[in-house]
Image: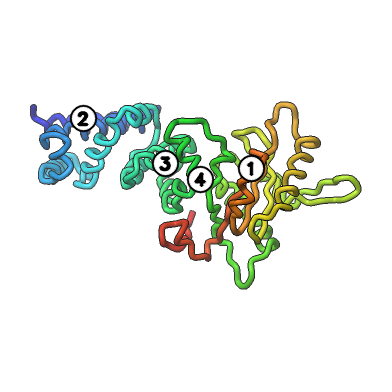
Amino acid sequence: MNYYNEIKNILIDNAIGRKVREYKSNQKDLESYYNVGKLLVEAQGGEERAKYGNGLIKEYSKRLTTELGKGYSTRNLKYMRNFYLLAKGQTLSALFKNTNVFWSNVCEILKLKDVNEIEYYLNLSNKLCLSTRELRARIKSNEYNRLPVEVKEKLKSNELVSTSDKVPSPVVLQNLKVDDKLTEKIVQKWIDENPTSFCEALGEGYTYVKSQYKIKIGSNYNYIDVLLFNVINMNYVVVEIKVTELKKEHIGQIETYMNYVDTNLKKEFHNKTTGILLVRDNNKWLIKYINNDGIKVRKYITSEEQVSECLGGLKWITIMK
């Protein structure tokens, strides 16, 4: 078999087809590059040799660039080869066949080493239609590694995971600047000014209803720090922010607010209200004795803090949108 000609024909066919097709164009790209990757592996003498042999790829890249133009650099052909080596596995292969992710997104994901992390970002990119820039921002924020351990285990075994379970730990409040001492008022002000960023920091499906939501319990007025609605789970979400570690009175407070919302705001077609307690330090012993599965406790950090334990020894990098 003339591997070079086979590869060249696939790439020409894909380039021509891209000019006339619209529907599922990304999927056709992935299919073409998968087949190119397969041929590259075969041309290099199999998987083991392909992992280390780059001489043939350099030769093919030079010839393809001369004959077809830009887009066939050594790096791009390596991505195609690695894409095949990764996607030929049964689970990921099925996933790639049913995705409409941009090839540029796949290249970003291929830089990762952990298969579970790769699968997470691929699913995320496909589900939320992320641009390459948006995907890169999520990877840089170490989103997957900030998921609770039990959530990652469920994802590995393809168990159903609710959006409230997926709230990361820590939650990063981007661009929240603290000149002196952090107070609840400072955090509240940031949320009021950045409701979209706050919802995105919590995960999927959260929409902003109101801050300092006024409720009346008996003869007293109380204020929910932030009231959200999750359009995926179809339920209200009560968020309480504390600048201390978790205390037992915090649990009673948020549970009271959740019950109020269930009684007075929740409709028949809504699911039960959940609660998110954002604290500065998790009191793991107290968390252990929370009986209400609807209450999630998460630590939060600001973008000005040193977060070496959470984000791999790096300070948070502000990502321009």
SS of the residue under disc 2: helix
Which residue type carries mark 4? Pro
Distance from disc 3 to disc 4, alpha carbons, whole Å, reads: 16 Å
Which callout, 4 or 1, points at the residue further toward the start of the chain? 4
Which residue type carries mark 3? Tyr
Residue at 45% x, 38% y: name it.
153
Image x and y of residue 210, in percent: 72, 48
SS of the residue under disc 3: helix
Which residue type carries mark 1? Thr
Residue bearing the label numbered 3: 121
Q: From the viewer's perspective, is the residue at label 3 or at label 4 nearer? A: 4
Q: From the viewer's perspective, is the residue at label 2 or at label 1 nearer? A: 1
Residue 148: mark in rendering: 4
Residue bearing the label numbered 1: 207
Against 185, residue 102 (above or below) is above
Distance from disc 3 to disc 2, alpha carbons, whole Å, reads: 27 Å
Residue 10: mark in rendering: 2
Image x and y of residue 71, in percent: 24, 43
Which residue type carries mark 2? Ile
Query: In this rendering, would 23 be left or right of 113?
Result: right
Query: In this rendering, would 308 be left or right of 92?
Result: right
Which callout, 2 or 1, points at the residue further toward the start of the chain? 2
Q: From the viewer's perspective, is the residue at label 3 or at label 2 nearer? A: 3
Which callout, 3 or 1, points at the residue further toward the start of the chain? 3
